[in-house]
Each structure stands twice: as structure tokens, then as C-alpha cells.
Amino acid sequence: MTATTPHTATPNAPAPRAARIALVGDRSPSVTSHTRIPLLLDALAARDGLVLDAYWISTEDAEEPGAVRGFDAVWVVPGSPYRSEAGALAAIRTAREDGVPFLGTCGGFQHTLLEFARHVCDLTDVAHAENDPDADDLLIAPLACSLVGHEGTVTIAPDSLAESVVGARSSIERYHCTYGPGAHLDTLRAHGLRFSGEDEAGQVRMTELPGHPFFLATLFQPELSGDGSRPHPIVRALARAAVRHAGVPA
């Protein structure tokens, strides 16, 4: 799927290329966020002049070396359990190490923590309960209360990327998940990951990586905000970061 809008080029100058975004996930018409994302891309082009060429990459294909290299942004979308945990982690790692704008939502958030724990913190045995329920060391565990269909207030840390993107210190967001972060959060924090959003109970719901051009992950699903005609500020911020990465004026 590709969303494009022609650019106006100056005479005798090559038209700037559209930013390319990799949507990493196992695309399915039964996953609401997957059907919503094309609408958001169209709205970004029409309302904001942010033109993204979007390419769906299955988690199995994301296992291939360099699968997401050359893209201007990577979005690991909801829809877990992914067919390939390794593929999701590989896409996240490439974006993190190569300085490519990155967004992970719902399952993408969970796997962002998993990737950082394994490859930065050297917590090689941590697991995701959805993928490995019998593991001894669960970084991502079943939530005490399912968040499927839940809305809640997220409090955002001051002077964070999240605050600059959302433009407020709190926001009401939508969830569709039954797993969330459990152990080792202090270790992830000590190695440089910042937890920049919490729910009413103080549970981590947003994370970011200081020093990276744009690296943000949310347990909630900003792509489900509204009716799809007005992209959530987080989605718009990812698009702007992709356009900057591509060198396209915005």
C-alpha cells in the first residue's frame, strides 16, 4: 500500500522523493489498526502535506538482513503475537542503531522493551509471555486487568519527546492489549531508556530513547484515535521525522 501526493518542484530541479516508511507487522483485515493506517496516511498527505510511501513488511520478511534499511521511518504496528518475534526485534534494532525514526505501538511497544533488554542490557533470557508463557524471566507479562477496549489517562513526563509531540502533560488514549511491562524496568532505565508516560496507577505506558532522532513507543494505540481523518499527534510527529530523514521540505 502506498499513499502519494505529487510534490510541486521548482523549474530545472529534481522533485524531492517521498519519505518511505516500513510498516512492520503481519497485515490482517481483522486488526483494526491495520485498516486504520491507510486512512491516516491519506490524511497526513491531504491535511499536512506529509507524503509517505508506505510498505508493509511481514515480521517473517523482517528477519532478512537489511529488511528495513533504506527506509526513512519504521513503525512496528499492533497485531501480536507476531509470526516472527525475531523479525520484529530485528526491525526495532535496526531503527535504534541506525538512527531511523521509529514508532512502536501496542505489540510494538512490548517488543521495543524486549529488544532493548536483550541487546543493550544483555538480559538475554527475558521473554514475552504471549510468545513464551512458560519462561522463567518475563519482561512482558499478562496485565492484571485486560486493556482490550479500555481508555485511560496517560500522564506524560515533562521535557520529554512525548510531551513535545503530544503538546500536553496528559492525554486520554485507547488500548487493545492484555500484556504489559513487568520486571527489569530499573535496568532498562539505567541503560538509557526513558519511561515518559504512565497510567493512573503509575504503570509505564510510553518509552523513548534520548539522543535518537525520533524513537518512541506506546502501549496504547494512537492510530485508533478519532475516526482516522485527523492523525494523532504521535502519528503526525513520526511522519514529520520521516520527511526530515528523507530530506523532503515540510
Image (cartoon, rainbow, N blue to C red):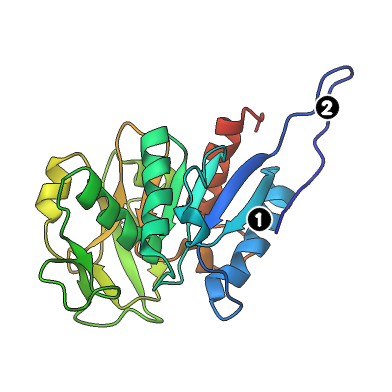
Q: In this view, does 186 lie above or below 136?
A: above
Mark identifier at residue 41 = 1
Determine the secondary structure under disc 1: helix
- Who's the residue at 80% across and 28% down the image? 15
According to the image, label 2 marks what residue? 9
250 or 134: which is nearer to us?
A: 134
Q: Quadrant of residue 215?
A: top left
Is 18 left or right of 15, judged from the image as shown? Answer: left
Along the line of sight, the residue nearer the viewer: 169 or 216:
216
> Is residue 212 placed above or below 182 in the rendered structure?
above
Residue 239 visible from this viewpoint? yes
Q: Most extreme residue toward the top, as rendered?
A: 12
Three-letter code for the amino acid on which mark 2 is drawn: Ala
Q: Residue at x 55, y 32 (%)?
A: 245
Residue at mark 1 to residue at mark 2: CA–CA distance:
21 Å
Q: Is residue 97 left or right of residue 50?
A: left
Q: In this view, does 244 lie above or below 76?
A: above
